[in-house]
Image (cartoon, grey):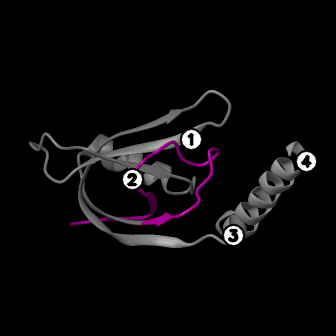
Amino acid sequence: MRTLFRWFLGLLVVIALFCSFPLWVIPYRTASGEHTGYVTAVERKGVFFKTWTAYVKTSPTSSQEDVYCVIDRSVIPQLQQAAQSNQHVDLYFVDWLKRGVQNCKGESAIITKVVPIN
């Protein structure tokens, strides 16, 4: 009986691995868009995998603050400048089904581009 149970459990594990394999390997874009607002802060955090996080408000007086992940290091100085100068910006973002713990820590999406609004 134990052998049959182990065989059945092993079969379930193999089926589960086979069915979810594409989720591990193929990055699937689940969202993309644009957020117009003000960058309030940019911070680097993490114990083992240091990641960048940007905080954005739609208006300077808004109490709601959205949190974004930043992977592209060339975007970080633009975000820091926008935060320091309180500049109105367009942020372009994407989200992937599988981002990985080394990239993001639960933020809503990944900022890919920053465009200042004059």
Name the residue type under label 1: Thr
Predominant SS of the magenta segment: loop
Closer to the eye: label 2 or 1: 2
The picture places residue 28, in percent across and down from the top left corner, at: 56, 72
Q: CA distance from mark 1 to mark 4?
A: 46 Å
The residue under the point 13% across, 39% down is: 63
Which residue is nearer to you in this view: 92 or 106? 106
| Mark 4 lies on residue | 3
Q: Which residues are magenta?
A: 94-118
Secondary element type, mark 2: loop
Q: CA distance from mark 3 to mark 4?
A: 24 Å
Closer to the eye: label 1 or 4: 4
Q: CA distance from mark 2 to mark 1?
A: 14 Å
The picture places residue 52, in percent across and down from the top left corner, at: 51, 42
Closer to the eye: label 2 or 3: 3
Which residue is nearer to you in this view: 81 or 99? 99
Name the residue type under label 2: Ser
Q: Earlier in the sequence, mark 1 or mark 4?
A: 4
The residue under the point 24% across, 44% down is: 65
Q: Earlier in the sequence, mark 2 or mark 3?
A: 3
Q: Is residue 32 left or right of residue 44?
A: left
The picture places residue 46, in percent across and down from the top left corner, at: 57, 31
The residue under the point 32% across, 50% down is: 82
Q: Residue furthest left?
A: 61
| Mark 1 lies on residue | 51
Q: Earlier in the sequence, mark 3 or mark 4?
A: 4
Q: Which mark is drawn over residue 108?
A: 2
| Mark 3 lies on residue | 19
